[in-house]
Amino acid sequence: MATERKRKRNNETGTNGLKRRHVTSDKNKQHISDDVSEVTQIAADVFPPLVGGEDEDEGSDSGSEEEEWTGLDGAADGDVKGSEHTGSKPKKPPTGEELRNIKDATELYRSSSFKLQIDALLPNVHPKYERFAPLDRFLHSLYSFLHSIPSVEPEHPLIASRRLLKKGIAVPYSAPQPTEDTNWKVSFTKPNEVTVVGSWPTKLSVKAKDKNPYRVDVAVEMPAALFQEKDYLNGRFFHKRAYYLAVVASAIARKGGELNVDVLFDSVAGDSRLTTLVLRPKQGLKNDWSKLNVEVRIMPTLPSDCPIPLQRLSPSRSNIRTLTSEEAQEEFSTPLYNTALLLGLTPRAHLLRVYALKEAVPAFADALTLLRVWANQRGYSEGGKFCVRGFEGKGMWWAAVLDLLIHGEETSGLAKLSPKRKPLGKGLSSYQLFRAALDLFARHDFTQERVYLKSEGGHRFLPQEYNTHEAVFVDSTSSVNLLAGVPMSSLDMLKHDAKLTLETLNDGTSAAGSKDPFREVFLKDLRDLQSRFDVVMRVDLSSAKPSQPSPHATLDHGSPFNALIADLASKLRSGLSDRIKALAVLLPTSGPRSLSQAHPSNSPIIYIGLVLNTDHAFRLVDHGPPADDPNPANVQQFRDFWGDKAELRRFKDGSIVESVVWDVKNVDERAHIPFNISRYLLSRHSGIPSEDVRGWQASYDSTLRLPESIASFYQAARSATGFKTAMTAFEGLIKSIKALDDELPLAVLNISPSSESLRYTNTFVPVALPPSLSSILPACARYAPVMDVIIEFEKSGRWPDDLKAIQKIKLAFFETLATALMKSVKGLRATVVVGDGVSTSEMQDVASLEIITPDGWAFSARIWHDREAILLDKIIDDKPHIPKHLKRKLQQTSDSSGAEAKERQEAMETKALYIRRFIHAPRHHRAIAALSHRFSAFAGTVRLVKRWLASHWLLHGYISEEVVELICASIFLGSDASSKDRESVPGTKERGLAVVVEFLKDWEWENGLFVPLYGSSESEITDVTKQPSLTGGKSGAWAVSTELDPTGHMWTSNGPDAIVARRVRTIAKASWSCLQEVEDGNFDVKTLFVHPTEHYDIIMRLDPSALPRYYQNITADPSVWKGKYANAVLNGESKDALKPGFDPAQLLFNDLKRVYKDTLKIFHDPFGGNLFGAVWDPTLKESRPFRVLGGFSSTPVRKDNEKGKDKSLVVLNTDAVLSEIERLGAGLVTSITVQV
């Protein structure tokens, strides 16, 4: 019995007291109640309830019919006995059907928990239809009202519009407008039918983004008597439709008290031909439905017996006559115009088709919901933010995609334009259908492969008649191309997003996946520009003047604005070609307007986002047709497209081709090539001035550059600069050292770099500082960076077996090496550096060789001797053969003094430093250098992130450079280092920074992070796992692990702690909010890097003229080196010897951090920051009993109402601490401000 009770307790609680998941006898049959509640809460946050107020209480007992099963024991929440029930129903075991559902969930979905998450999400994105009785009553009233509107006799369209205009109703006639010579008339008679169409009657409505209301579409069928056979010409149908809609609007507005609604016009995608009537409820009357967050849209439709001949609406026919000669017009087809007219026939047919799919396929409704939610989260629908062009009003297309997957495509009677897709059938789950749709988006080539859904009567138009459309996806009515008007660039973006989602789902199946795939796919808003696109452009179209305006294209697209956007997207896609994976034109969703405004207004501001193909994005030359092309039209077309940029060039292989060359001056400008191409094409073809196309890449670049006035010194001195130049200097040093083998006791086996300057990730580009330049630079710009290298000599048995002696031998090696180097290389200076001024350990590696090359490059070399690790292990554990529990008893009974324990602790700290410096640092360097070569944006991303963290006073002091590199590597590698073509890899450093900031604001660092940095280096993994994990008794809050560092504290042992980790999250959230200002046009890059100081208790101001790195300050004041300090060179101040790596501000920071570690926490920008910020330990402000060696400066508490002091209680003596800091910083600290 005891064993049985123990088993029950283990099922209910884990070892840490947390509630565990109950599991049936089958491993795959899990009931994960915690996941359901969690996802329900998340979904409720993302998709808030439709109805607020008292209506939320309705149906609150809906969950009382089904009780949650909590296991075979029948116990819940720690109730082991299960014998007492306080009025609740007894728990029942799962039924056979429930067990089958659990099994199906595992087989048909990613996992059973994923199905539970989907089940929790779906109710939160649909309206609660049982609460819509007021809306139903309104729809009945609207039906009666529409049938009661009196008829209007036929009259001239202009006369009719003037009559309505007197009533405040503008008729939304589309172009070409009717004229006085128009010989047809408009009229109104009551509709044949009034039908609710769209997703509302099939209960498939999905919550829109940005609190947009649900839509109830009401199709009003206009009588056939209103139309004539020729109404397909010159917009006559649309004019009659517009008048019909205006009459309905006038009637509702005039008698609005009966319906209690506001009436507005709205045009889908800004197309006046697709204008609808929007009815929004008012408050106060009996049939009040204003709390339902829903609006009704009235759309006039064509009757089935309409006299307009449908064969005249083929996509290849021309139905707009703008010239006198009809023969001349025949060659200009009007596919978009014809499609807009045919849409008047489809609402009822689409409703029936969707209803049939819902009835025939059990999973169709849920699959469509998942697909719509996925699309909404990525901007493929209406919303308050900028949305992807072309998908507004395309709700039926998502259902048609699932129709294609379920039933396949039509092939009978059609030419084989694409491979036949086998239908998937009706038995798939909603997740499987959803994933199949993503797979279709990711694989389908919309430019080459056309899609024709199965149609009962076959398709009306021949395949060649759709040649005028960019993409073809014909619906089941065989009349409408559902992708008409959708730019190919938007479909490229859809393909890219589908690949990203599939990548996320696949990553989620691996153990290393750190993201929740369900949240990433369905709950996360992915419309943010900076983290979604590599290049973001803000374009002002106010001054746009197309170079070749086409009246015909304007009429076909419905407006000049739509024609401009279509041409702009097409030109950019053609010009950028394989430089990009996707291009998205983003603009606001068209909104409702008053009835007095006939046509929609368009915002002149649009955004263009580029997702780069980094293999080709930054090439300098675009090749065109050869000079001897047999078709001269190709050459002329290339020259017309590129204009003055096109030129004839001969290349090394002897070919002479038309080319476009993009001139760049440095590496940063090369990354701007896609932006420069876009700006040039927008200027050439759309007449948009260059100043109206704004990007932010140059502003980001400026944060990583030296001030121009300082850079001019290096340029004038022709100083060596650049990462490759630094590597060349390092290779030269290797050759110089290896050439000295005859003069050294042991031959040099290897020299390994471990400096960020030699792996492309240093924040600033490395620069050499030769003596000629250092003598003219101001003191605040005379910092010489040092590059660390590790020297490994050949193995020898002559090394001593004493750690202290080994350190002495290293000094002798350095002395010999320095002497030999200075003899062999003229102008080289080598100095042996002993100690760091802090460590007093004689066994620790503190000696180094400082080398300054004749060109001004500074290196710091250390010697790696592998015997040190063995000797340290002996001190740490001199009896490895004795079990640990016996060893503890021996230590307790030992009479030895604390000297051994102190020595052991010292050895542990030395071993931790040894492993980090000589084992992990070189391997980390090689891995990061490889990533810098593999991903073009990786190094730039790391540099920007370091600059961002440094500007917020976190880098180096609390966050090591290595852990920053690891976090950035996780963004590029994902969960699998071996995968090469990840869609989510940033293509520019700007996007990389945004993604890292987004990660840090959401990262639950308590769970750690795994980075597959080393890929499949099994030999290294095996080697390092043998090394003990030592951190010197310290451990940071972040755990960033790799294959070689499973604990994750190799680079975080000294920080950040929990306080700083939370600080990073707060700063990341603030920075993310700042990034969102891009959409407002108010974004300034510098604001990302300006740190607020009002939250610090103490601000210490340093003298900028005494800081050698001040010129690197993000807000450096040029007057410091141009003003009163500019003549310091003349006074002999700059004649001191060059001091590589000397940074007095960093040294002071280190001292204050070490001395006052128990008193305050201090922060500083290592890149020339002239401010220190500090916060007191809040616990020290409370009085406490006095004790010896309390760890902080204290003073007795003053007694209340007495002059004396209570010597038994003490508090922090802030005045004394500040006085000590002032003395420590004498000559460097100019002022200390205490902030209240």
Image (cartoon, helix red, strand yellow):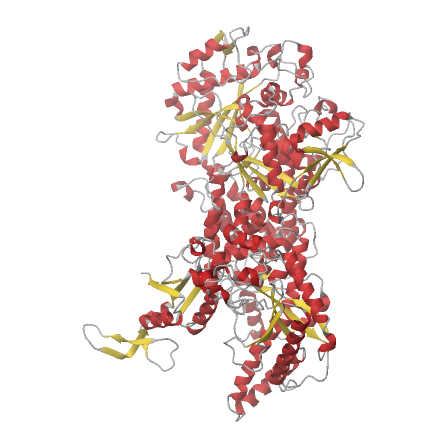
* Residue 166 makes an appearance in the image: yes
Looking at the picture, does residue 869 appear above or below residue 74? below
**Residue 647 drawn at (x, y percent):** 70, 33
Q: How many labels, in total?
A: 0
Q: Nearer the viewer, residue 719 or 18?
A: 719
**Residue 133 drawn at (x, y percent):** 45, 33
The residue at 45%/41% (across/down) is 1082
Quarter placement of the N terminus: bottom right
Left or right placement of residue 528 versus residue 1205 in this view: right
**Residue 999 drawn at (x, y percent):** 54, 54
Q: Nearer the viewer, residue 1128 or 1181?
A: 1128
The residue at 59%/60% (across/down) is 768
Quarter placement of the C terminus: bottom left
Looking at the picture, does residue 994 appear above or below residue 134? below
Q: Nearer the viewer, residue 839 or 207?
A: 839
The residue at 66%/62% (across/down) is 729
